[in-house]
Image (cartoon, rainbow, N blue to C red):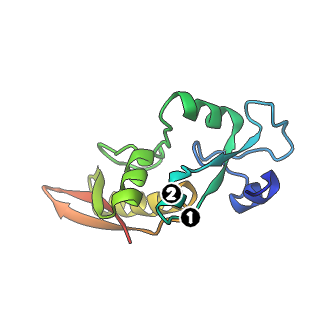
């Protein structure tokens, strides 16, 4: 196990769930204070690395009550986006690929792809993802693949 400062520096003091900054000087008892979230320990049994990530205390606590949600950016144009946490966990567990959103044109699909890979580098840093942009029906499918 790492200490809070090591995990904070590893994650650039950004909450893995909401992707917002975490104040390293905030009280650990504050809702927006830093906390270490341990990724499912069953991963170790399956030979996958144990992961600790930085989260706001409130985000970490709410994750125990509700399924965690990592929102898609409001700055990209996607239709029918897949819940990121669920698709990441599923692809990490089973491998393969999955359509995660539709985009109206190639430019939007490229922007969404870049944003998605950047976001996933913080959401699941130990998993190697790639994206594909597949045209069809006058739109582009954004496909996420685990390598």
Q: Mark number for residue 43?
A: 2
| Residue at x-position 57% and y-position 51% | 39
**Whether residue 112 can be seen here:** yes
Q: Residue at x 16, y 56 (%)?
A: 138
Please name the residue that numbered disc 1 is placed on: 49
Instruction: Give the mark count.
Output: 2
Q: Is residue 37 left or right of residue 90?
A: right
Of pointers 2 and 1, the one earlier in the residue sequence: 2
The quarter of the picture where the N terminus appears is: bottom right
Residue 50 vs residue 80, the one in the foreground = 50
The image quarter containing residue 133 is bottom left
Q: Residue furthest front?
A: 45
As helix, strand or loop, the secondary structure at mark 1 comes to loop
User: Could you tell me if residue 142 is visible in this image?
Assistant: no
Mark number displayed over residue 133: none
Distance between mark 2 and mark 1 Cα atoms? 7 Å
**Whether residue 128 is situated above or below residue 36 in the rendered picture:** below
Q: Residue at point 29% right, 64% down?
A: 96
In the rendering, at what x and y percent does residue 76 appear? 43, 50
């Amino acid at each position: 196990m790492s200490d809070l400062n090591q995990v904070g520096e590893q994650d650039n003091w950004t909450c893995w769930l909401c992707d917002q900054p975490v104040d390293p000087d905030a009280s650990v008892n504050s809702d927006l204070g830093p906390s270490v979230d341990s990724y499912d320990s069953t991963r170790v049994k399956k030979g996958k690395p144990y992961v600790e990530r930085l989260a706001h205390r409130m985000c970490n606590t709410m994750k125990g009550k509700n399924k965690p949600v990592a929102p898609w950016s409001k700055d990209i144009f996607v239709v029918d986006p897949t819940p990121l946490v669920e698709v990441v966990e599923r692809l990490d567990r089973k491998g393969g690929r999955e359509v995660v959103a539709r985009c109206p044109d190639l430019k939007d699909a490229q922007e969404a792809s870049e944003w998605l890979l950047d976001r996933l580098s913080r959401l699941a840093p130990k998993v190697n993802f790639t994206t594909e942009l597949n045209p069809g029906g006058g739109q582009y499918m954004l496909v996420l693949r685990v390598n």
